Image (tube, rainbow, N blue to C red):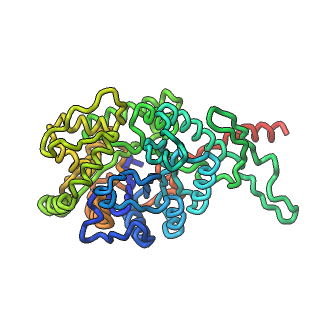
């Protein structure tokens, strides 16, 4: 079968654009309404998407009164929401974001395993380490741990979670009513992990899941984030704005995966993409300009300052250039990307926050279905991407436009499936079901029995 695109939808309550909630076609109360998400996932499944991707944050970050109330801050907990959506869908993957800094491995192993069972093999974990002091303030931490500590913890966290997912052999639950034996004890394994951050005995109280392991998704683009993704990630969510940068990232992370003992094809790279599509370019431009007109300056500036690591831009002219930022600070990969864009394109602060308020470092495409498909085909065919995480500016309208206009164009070109295939999310993503770490031991015991 020829290679085809993988698609996810990145769901941020009312849309990726910071002013999406103000769009006249959007229900501003939607973030707390289950019906909103039910409609979104049904649209995505109609579009044959692989992934329904829920972002998450563990704090209300902006505390300045003037800015605080101008964007939706309330959102539902992802795993709870996806568990409710699971029985209403049949094929689409259910991806929840969960932090390795503010959780324990046993809890997350149990929750994601439960979701995989409830969805018949469609669960995925988006692994994040969290970097916000506002989040640390909610978990009794005086300071957010430094990146090197967070990523060491994340590696050990993932190792423990995968070990717990192997607690039960695939054939452990024989449930022999006549014999009165629910499972042979030798088919249940304690992990007995002792490490730098965690001491976890196990076993897990959830049996081995349909996928073997839920799908592992990773979204960091820092040096440590790329290394974590290369070692463990199966779907990599990333942000590049040019094909050259996308190709560099694609080669780098797949090369690092090989060095970690994996195959290049063990990873699927899905950059974020913000499309505004209409039958004509003029109509698409009108849609985009309508969104931009709704962005409040305080909101745009606050978002820019957040992505620049909390640097204050107060006192600078909005229509002047981005000032030289304080030296000696450790800027995130996203912050450096925005700084580079501002310098490269000679953007003013206002122009930069307008970009941040839209795609926040991801490609912005305003055009016809053919325009969007041309871009996607180029990145896909020239090893810049294995697919895309679609980030509609407003919901559900932006997603409906993509499904109704772009998906048929991709199918016409032979770049995208016309039906779902496979029983689990792993199968649809082209991955094998991982064997349990105890499978070889069990085979030797039975062989020598």
Snapshot quadrant of residue 28: bottom left
Q: Residue 156: give x, y in percent of width and height.
A: 59, 36
240 relative to 258 in the view: left or right? left
Say if 363 sits above or below 343 in the image. Answer: below
Q: Please name whichever residue, 230 or 223, is drawn nearer the observer in this view of the structure.
A: 223
Res. 40 visible in picture: yes
Say if 393 sits above or below 145 in the image. Answer: below
Image point 27% across, 64% down: which residue? 401
Res. 430 visible in picture: no
The C terminus, quarter of image? top right
Q: Residue 265: give x, y in percent of width and height.
A: 45, 38
161 relative to 149 in the view: left or right? right
Q: What number of labels is visible?
A: 0
Image point 54% across, 68% down: which residue? 87
Q: Residue 334: give x, y in percent of width and height.
A: 33, 39
Image point 24% across, 54% down: which residue? 298
């Amino acid at each position: 079968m020829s290679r085809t695109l993988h698609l996810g939808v990145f769901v941020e309550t009312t849309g990726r654009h910071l002013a999406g909630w103000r769009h006249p076609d959007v229900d501003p109360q939607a973030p707390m309404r289950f019906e909103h998400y039910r409609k979104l996932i049904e649209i995505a499944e109609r579009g044959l998407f692989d992934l329904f991707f829920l972002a998450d944050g563990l704090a209300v970050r902006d505390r300045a009164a003037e800015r605080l109330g101008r964007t939706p801050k309330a959102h539902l907990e992802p795993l709870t929401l996806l568990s409710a959506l699971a029985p209403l869908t049949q094929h689409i993957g259910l991806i929840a974001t969960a932090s390795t800094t503010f959780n324990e491995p046993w809890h997350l192993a149990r929750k994601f395993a439960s979701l995989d069972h409830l969805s018949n093999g469609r669960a995925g974990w988006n692994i994040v380490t969290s970097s916000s002091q506002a989040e640390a303030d909610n978990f009794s931490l005086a300071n957010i741990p430094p990146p090197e500590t967070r990523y060491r913890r994340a590696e050990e966290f993932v190792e423990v979670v995968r070990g717990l997912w192997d607690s039960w052999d695939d054939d452990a639950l024989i449930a022999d009513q006549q014999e009165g034996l629910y499972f042979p004890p030798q088919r249940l394994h304690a992990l007995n992990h002792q490490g730098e951050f965690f001491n976890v005995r196990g076993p897990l109280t959830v049996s081995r899941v349909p996928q073997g392991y839920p799908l592992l998704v990773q979204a960091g683009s820092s040096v440590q984030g790329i290394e974590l993704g290369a070692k463990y990630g199966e779907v990599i969510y990333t942000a590049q704005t040019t094909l050259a940068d996308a190709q560099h990232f694609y080669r780098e992370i797949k090369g690092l995966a090989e060095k970690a003992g994996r195959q290049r094809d063990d990873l699927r790279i899905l950059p974020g993409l913000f499309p505004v599509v209409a039958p004509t370019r003029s109509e698409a431009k009108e849609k985009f300009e309508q969104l931009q007109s709704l962005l409040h300056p305080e909101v745009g500036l606050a978002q820019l300052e957040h992505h620049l690591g909390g640097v204050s831009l107060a006192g600078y002219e909005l229509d002047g250039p981005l000032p030289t930022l304080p030296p000696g600070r450790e800027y995130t990969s996203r912050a450096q990307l925005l700084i580079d864009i501002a310098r490269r394109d000679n953007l003013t602060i206002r122009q930069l926050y307008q970009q941040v308020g839209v795609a926040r470092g991801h490609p912005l495409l305003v055009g016809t279905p053919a325009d969007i498909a041309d871009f996607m085909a180029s990145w896909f065919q020239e090893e810049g991407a294995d697919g895309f995480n679609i980030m509609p500016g407003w919901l559900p309208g932006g997603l409906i436009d993509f499904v109704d206009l772009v998906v048929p164009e991709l199918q016409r070109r032979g770049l995208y499936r016309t039906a779902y295939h496979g029983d689990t999310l792993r199968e649809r993503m082209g991955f094998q079901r991982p064997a349990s770490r105890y499978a070889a031991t069990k085979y030797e015991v039975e062989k020598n029995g």
